[in-house]
Amino acid sequence: MRTLCSSTLIGEFFVIGFAGLVAMKDDGLSTSTVWWVCGVAMVLSVLLCGMITRPGGVQLGWALQIGLILSGFFVPVMFFLGAVFAVLWWCSVHYGRKVDEIKARWAASNTAGQGSAGPDAA
């Protein structure tokens, strides 16, 4: 799960940065506000890469997805991109957990098989 989720979060890092560049062109938003908000979101996306397997990591990831969708009120294309990344996040979490389960079963079956008839048994 960690690899898939981290890949999604790194993609979001770049999208947030580019959205910040677009938001800077809006006369109603100050440049410092845009970069503080984008900077915090970018740092959060990188920090979440290391927190995915810890308690609350996935929930923080969902909060970031909601924030991306809501940023569409300032940069309209982010409604679409936020929804795309929310779907990617769901896929990363869902299929990442399945991959982790399959790996755990495979490792358990290989460990059990080696205990009874390993290469030195003959």
Image (tube, rainbow, N blue to C red):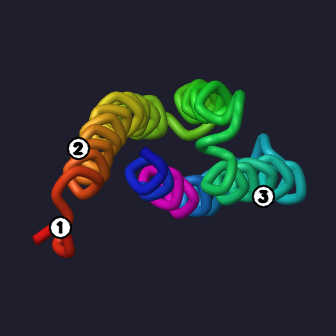
The answer to which of 4 and 100 lies nearer the viewer is: 100
Labels 2 and 1 touching (C-beta < 8 A): no
Q: Using a 10 Å C-alpha cutoff, classify the residue at mark 1 as few (fewer than 14 neighbours), some (14 to 19) or many (20 or more).
A: few
Q: Which residue is mark 2?
A: 109
Q: Position of residue 37 (x, y in %)?
A: 80, 47
Residue 113 inside the magenta-drawn segment: no
Vertical placement of 45 versus 74: above or below?
below
The quarter of the displayed image where residue 108 is located: top left
Give the spatial CA distance, label 2 vs label 3: 45 Å
Comparing 77 with 109, the one in front is: 109
Which mark is first along the chain, 3 or 2? 3
**What residue do we see at 22% from left, 51% from top?**
116
Does residue 25 appear in this view? no
Whether pointer 2 and pointer 3 mark residues with C-beta atoms closer than 8 Å, the reply is no
Whole-percent x, y for residue 3 in the image: 42, 56
Quadrant (top left/top right/bottom left/bottom right) for the C terminus:
bottom left
Residue placed at 42% from the left, 30% from the top?
A: 86
**Amino acid residing under circle 1:** Ala
On the image, the x and y values in percent for residue 47 come to 72, 55
Nearer to us of marks 2 and 1 is 1
For the residue labelled by badge 3, is the local secondary structure a helix, a strand or a loop? helix
Image side of residue 20 versus residue 32, left or right: left
Which sits earlier in the primary sequence, circle 1 or circle 3? 3
* Residue at horizontal 69 percent and vertical 39 percent from the top: 54
71 with respect to 80 (left or right): right
Describe the element under mark 1 as helix, strand or loop.
loop
Q: Earlier in the sequence, mark 2 or mark 1?
A: 2
Q: Which stretch is magenta? A: 8-15
Q: Looking at the picture, which amino acid does disc 3 mark?
A: Gly
Give the labeled residue for mark 1: 121
- Name the mark on residue 39: 3
